[in-house]
Amino acid sequence: MEISVIVPILNEEKNIPEFLRRIQAALTKIGNDYEIIFAMDPGSDRSEDVLKEHHRRDPRIKFLKFSRRFGQPMATLAGLQYSSGESVVVIDVDLQDPPELIVQMYEKSREGYDIVYAQRKSRAGETLIKRMIAGLGYKVINRIADVDIPPNTGDFRLMKRRVVNEVVKLKESHGFLRGLVAIVGFKKASVMYDRDPRFSGQGNYNRFLGSLRIGFNGIFCFSTYMLSISTMFGFAVASFAFVLGILYAILKFLGAPFPLGNPTIVILVLFMGGVQLISVGILGEYIGRIYEEVKQRPKFIVDAAVGLSSADATGVKVK
């Protein structure tokens, strides 16, 4: 198999036909030896029926249906595990990322690059607040993370088979693909593009809380810097309290008037309480992720694999 395309979806029946029309036209320019694997969380629309109909027309269109909703990151990892192509592309079905760009990404990979990621020049259809949060998030992650994640990139990328094999072997349960790909390394290149608005409907995965959760995974799963910040903040507060205590003692010794009473106590108690809660929250984020890792629950459970077999899910494929 020359190329596999992984498409995580949830309630996207209106986007599937147009997506397939455009992506098959693009893939045909590369060749006919391809597969399109939809990794589907169970939803409330007719996405499964639409995919079954397209599979009957073209067996190269395949899909996984999970036993429950596992989320976009796990759906993507499942698709990677079941894929068999020498090159593997991850793309969303909403057509914000143009399928036609895959041809350019594939040609770029033939120059010797193992990973070709699509980097956004503009983000049409997104609110100013979301663009600001995304820009700030990338800056924070790259500032403190132990890996380099290119700004203005998503999961839309092409990876050679050896990259996919290494990503599949990783045991992390968070599924933050951008970070996992950065961990395994290999030679990278970028292709610039303008991101389009959604073709139809509203996003089911990348809403505010979902994006925030993905951002937290980028911060807490690839760096211990937040623990250092908590420690430094604690020392700063302790130093402030120590200096304030000496100042109060000096003022008392000199007989100078200085503010005391309920307002001062309330301010200090609230300040210290806030610092403690922030520190406990940071610890909780790390402990929660440790808890998720040590349980070693399956990242996903497949209810149905149409066009795919259990033999395709061996995890690492050698070509």
Image (cartoon, grey):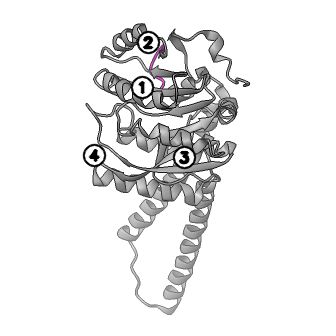
- Report, in whole angstroms, how far the alpha carbon at label 2 lies from the one at label 3: 38 Å
Q: The residue tagged with tag 4: helix, strand or loop?
A: loop
Instruction: Count residues near mark 3 (Cα–Cα under 10 Å), then give few for <14, some for 14-19, many for 20+.
Output: many
Badge nearest the viewer, 2 or 3: 2
Q: Which residue is the site of mark 1?
A: 24
Picture quarter containing residue 300?
A: top right
Instruction: Count residues near mark 1 (Cα–Cα under 10 Å), then give few for <14, some for 14-19, many for 20+.
Output: some
Of the numbered discs 3 and 1, the one sitting upstream in the chain is 1
Tell me the chief SS of the magenta region: loop
- Given contact means CB atoms under 8 Å apart, are the residues at marks 1 and 2 in contact? yes
Of the numbered discs 2 and 3, the one sitting upstream in the chain is 2
Of the numbered discs 3 and 4, the one sitting upstream in the chain is 4
Quadrant, the C terminus: top right
Of the numbered discs 1 and 2, the one sitting upstream in the chain is 1
At 49% from the left and 52% from the top, the residue drawn is 277
Q: Which residue is the site of mark 4?
A: 125
Q: Which residue is the site of mark 3?
A: 218
